[in-house]
Image (cartoon, rainbow, N blue to C red):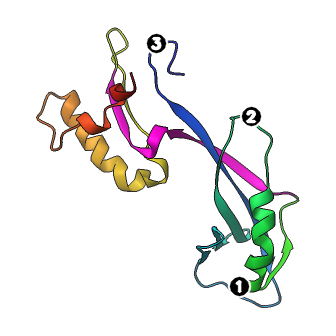
Amino acid sequence: MFRPPGYSVPLGIKRGCHLHLAPRGNAVLNHPVLDWDLGFLQALMDRGIRLTTGVEFARRDAPPKPIQVQQALPRARALFPLGEAIDAKTLGGRAAVFARYVAGHREGPWPCRLWFDFGHQHHGLMLGAATGRLLAEMMSGETPFADPTPIAAARFG
């Protein structure tokens, strides 16, 4: 997406897996349960209890690897009475990640004059407003409220 207009943006792919499970018996999950050591989270969703694990860095079209969910499942069942899987298989998703997990912005050269604001990883709701304001001030010629140099995508060439 960035190459045709001449931009070099070091994006990678991260992905994660999750599985929806029914609670066993009349068990009720009232709040998320995090196992920090093994790196999984159980949370109540409309479809049941979602068991989700950490991220994996992989090629965009690499086949899914549900091993993290499979490894977490016995321990998750020890923390909360999980029943059968609702999904036929482990589900997953992909997201673009910016190098070094640092947000970036860039003004494109003429004639495209594109402005980018990306790389917030899972912190977009928290950081998006601040970097959006920063870009708006830069685009309108105002003095930015913060120095944009440390997060300039131009640092990657």
- Amino acid residing under circle 1: Leu
Q: CA distance from mark 3 to mark 1?
A: 51 Å
Q: Amino acid at mark 3?
A: Pro
Write the residue at 79% across / 50% down.
Answer: 65
User: What is the distance, in whole Å, between disc 2 and disc 3 at their CAs?
Assistant: 24 Å
**Is 24 drawn above or below residue 90 in the view shown?**
below
Which-is-in-front pick, marks 2 and 3?
2
* Image-based side of 63 in relation to 12, left or right: right
Question: Mark 1, residues whose alpha carbon is within 10 Å: few (<14), some, or many (≥20)?
Answer: few
Secondary structure beneath disc 2? loop
Label 1: which residue? 79
Q: Residue at x 60, y 85 (%)?
A: 30
In the displayed structure, 113 sits above or below 64; it is above
Q: Residues within 10 Å of mark 2 (few under 14, many from 20)?
A: few
Q: CA distance from mark 1 to mark 2?
A: 34 Å
**Which structural element holds mark 1?**
helix
Horizontal side, residue 8 vs residue 107: left or right? right
Q: Left or right: where does residue 83 sit relative to residue 121?
A: right
- Determine the main secondary structure of the stretch shown in magenta: strand
Q: Residue at x 83, y 62 (%)?
A: 87
Residue found at the far top of this picture:
111
Pick out the residue farthest to the left: 143
Please state, as top left, top right, bottom left or bottom right, where the N terminus lies in the image. top right
Tell me which segment is drawn in magenta.
89-107
Q: Closer to us: mark 3 or mark 1? A: 1
Residue topped by disc 2: 61
Residue 5: give its label: 3
* Residue 69: in magenta span: no
Few, some or many residues within 10 Å of mark 3 (<14, 14–19, 20+): few
Q: What residue is drawn where x is 38% and y is 42%?
A: 103
Point out residue 117 in the picture as x, y percentages from the top left corner.
37, 36
